Image (spheres, rainbow, N blue to C red):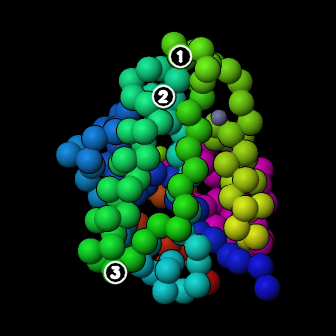
Amino acid sequence: MRNKAIFFDRDGTLNVDVHYLHEPEKFIWVEGAIEAIRWANAHGYLVIVVTNQSGIARGYYDEAAVHRLHDWMNMELAKCGTHIDAFYYCPHHTEGSVPAYTKQCDCRKPAPGMLLKAIAEHDIDPAASFLFGDAESDVVAAENAGVQGVRYTGGSLADCVRGAVR
Ligand SMILES: [Mg+2]
Ligand SMILES: [Zn+2]
């Protein structure tokens, strides 16, 4: 049997969007985010983050900083007995300042590249999976990958997840 997953956008969905976040000190969990992740774990879903990180292309921070932040997130979640199974990020942007990352890519949402990669690497059934994100581009990326996309518009993320996943 293939796996099922709940994908989450990061900034504005799991954490308060402070723009180009890369320092744990500035990370604030959204209401119900940890509870939503725990619920997904408990209901047999892989939890996978898919996040556009154009700050890398813009030279605001590097890939190592993103990995450090994601490791920190999982350390915090471990204290609450839960975890994120995988993180995917897009470091690209067409108007970057770092040549290696300045390009049109197929992974920046609304393109589905990050989801398609996760689906292949984790043997995920897209039709049994969901994505939650605060932007229309998240929902479009999900639909482009055959995953049900749900717009998170505020309030408890856990309530949003429990209401949509059945
Ligand atoms: Mg967002
Ligand atoms: Zn990309």
Quadrant of the frame with the N terminus? bottom right
What span is in magenta?
A: 125-150
In the rendered structure, which amino acid carries the disc numbered 2?
A: Ile
Left or right, residue 3 beside residue 73: right
Quadrant of the frame with the C terminus? bottom right
First along the sequence among labels 2 and 3: 2
- Of 134 and 102, the residue lying toward us: 102
User: Image point 54% across, 39% down: which residue?
Assistant: 52
User: Image point 68% across, 21% down: which residue?
Assistant: 103
- Of 49 and 70, the residue lying toward us: 70
Q: Identify the element where label 3 is drawn.
A: loop
Which label was assigned to residue 56? 2
Q: Position of residue 119 (x, y in %)?
A: 73, 62
Which label was assigned to residue 98? 1
Q: Identify the element where label 2 is drawn.
A: helix
The Cα–Cα distance between marks 1 and 3, rounded to whole angstroms, is 38 Å
Q: Is residue 148 above or below residue 112?
A: below
